[in-house]
Image: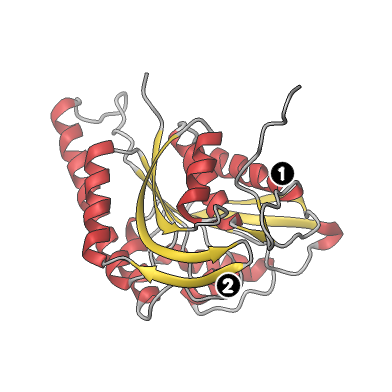
Amino acid sequence: MKLPKVVTIAGSDPSGGAGIQADLKVLAQFGVYGGAAVTALTRQTSAGVLGLFPLPAAWVLEQISDVLWDLRPPVVKTGMLQQPAVISGLGRLWGAYLQEYRDTAAQVLPPASSTTPAPTLPILVVDPVLSSGAGVSLVDGGGLAAFREDLLPVTTVLTPNVPEAEALTGMAIRDSGDMIGAAERLLQFGPQWVLLKGGHLPEWEGDRIADLLISREERRWLWGQRVPRADLHGTGCSLASALAACLALGLPVPVAAARAVEWLRQRIGSPLFVGQGRGVVCQKLEEKRE
């Protein structure tokens, strides 16, 4: 049986609500094996980020290379990368990983034709984490340029929220029309798909809310009912991980995105409060049976 696998590349959150801890919990809920490469250590509680200790960039990239060529994951998901050298280095590593995959496939598979399509390449889901939910910057100077120039050109699905999309594009996003314009601008940097999350915009008509999934060929609004806002932690990490899990299970991007968004909205409606600060959405505990 082919084992669905995802490797997450992100920072560590000792409170367990975001970062690699949240990613691995989400992957496990979807029945997907999770590996992880750690980019930074944080002092963090459910109330927010207290301190950040980035690991040496060369060591982070060696960690990523080791796990890529060992586990051979069909899907990789990124979270906080923090350092421009890590962002750019990951872009180069991913390009090499794709090329080796193409070369290996060419040796063992018949040439692609109308009846034998080309093999599916590994998928890179990029959650461009630029700041914490409480506003603490989580990327060094030069990070935005590294994203645009080195990582987005090899990205399969980019999952920014509105502030992240504004930072990457330099555009103000105030309504659905702005979302479309910003998403189209992001596509120009190279990703195959953009899932632009609309939760930071003012309420839509009738308490509806929408995320925008867009490629060069199609555009889809993922509509839903706005859940009464709670003070939550790790929603972006959890959504990107759910998307990565669905992709590892073989779902096409539009189906995977719709399923991941619906999963997150359900979790937002019933968060778990484990500490003295914000709630989390990444974990669903089994009820204790007598």
The quadrant in which the C terminus is found is: top right
Q: Which mark is residue 9?
A: none
Name of the residue lying farthest toward the right: 206
Q: Residue, x 70% and y 68% (percent of image)?
A: 201
As measured in the structure, the alpha-carbon distance from the residue carrying label 2 to the one carrying label 1 is 23 Å
Q: Name the residue that disc number 2 marks.
A: 163
Q: Which image quarter: residue 52?
A: bottom left
Residue 103, percent from left and from top: 15, 39
Can residue 218 be seen?
A: no
Q: How many numbered marks are there?
A: 2
Residue 118 found in image quarter: top left
Write the residue at 63% across / 66% down: 47
Query: Extreme front residue here?
Result: 290
Q: From the viewer's perspective, is residue 74 above or below residue 10?
A: above
* Residue in the image at 20% along x and 51% along y: 96
Residue hosting label 1: 266
